[in-house]
Amino acid sequence: MLSDVYQETEERMDKAINILVQELNTIRTGRANPSLVELLPIEYYGTQTPLQELASISVPESRSLLIRPYDASSLKNIEKAILKSDLGLMPNNDGENIRLVLPTPTEERRLELVKVVSIKAEDSRIAIRNIRRESIRNLRDFEDEKMIPEDDLHRGEEKVQEIIDTYTQKIDTICERKEEEIMEV
């Protein structure tokens, strides 16, 4: 019973970490990375479709992305979606492919991005704390229903806190790496 609570807690925290990583991957650091545009919604035959399903995305150079649509008719829609996005990139359309050149971010822009990273990190920490609160509430409910003794409740709370500490450290490590990547010139 306690192991189920621990397992559910870890699974939910893994999901929170994965969401953080996905969000951080969309932050432009000056280096080309396909994840910047992979999930960009493209209007395709009346349906919003992620770019990764409509085109291959490659990195021919460290500061550029090459987008090759599988269907040439989607080229204009991809270009429009990139222009409308908040990426701030200018697509170069050669009739078959779209090339995105990523400019080097200014010092001011890099500092803004570091702030965005810290906000996303704090959001993840809040999610982790909410998961902890729910897990401890479940343990207390088990104790109230006499399904576990009080000693197991205290051991369970300590174990949940250990899990929280581990995942908080993971969040800190991921965000430190991203901040270093952003500040790299």
Image: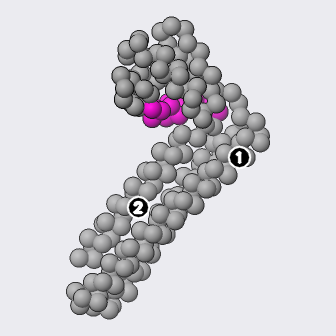
The residue positioned farthest toward the top in the image shown: 95
* Rendered residue at 48%/22% (across/down): 78
* Rendered residue at 45%/55% (across/down): 17
Which residue is denoted by mark 2 in the rendering? Answer: 13
User: x%, y% of residue 86?
Assistant: 60, 35
Which of the marked residues, 1 or 2, is nearer the chain's N terminus?
2
Above or below for 104 versus 78: below
Horizontal side of residue 3 vs 42, given as left or right:
left
Which residue is denoted by mark 1 in the rendering? Answer: 112
Q: Amino acid at mark 1?
A: Glu
Front one among 34 and 176: 34
Q: Quadrant of the N terminus?
A: bottom left
User: x%, y% of residue 135?
Assistant: 36, 74
Front one among 80 and 56: 80
For the residues marked 1 and 2, what is the alpha-carbon distance in whole angstroms? 27 Å
Query: Magenta segment: does it hold 15?
Result: no
Helix, strand or loop for the magenta stretch, by majority? loop
Q: Quadrant of residue 3?
A: bottom left
User: x%, y% of residue 69?
Assistant: 42, 17
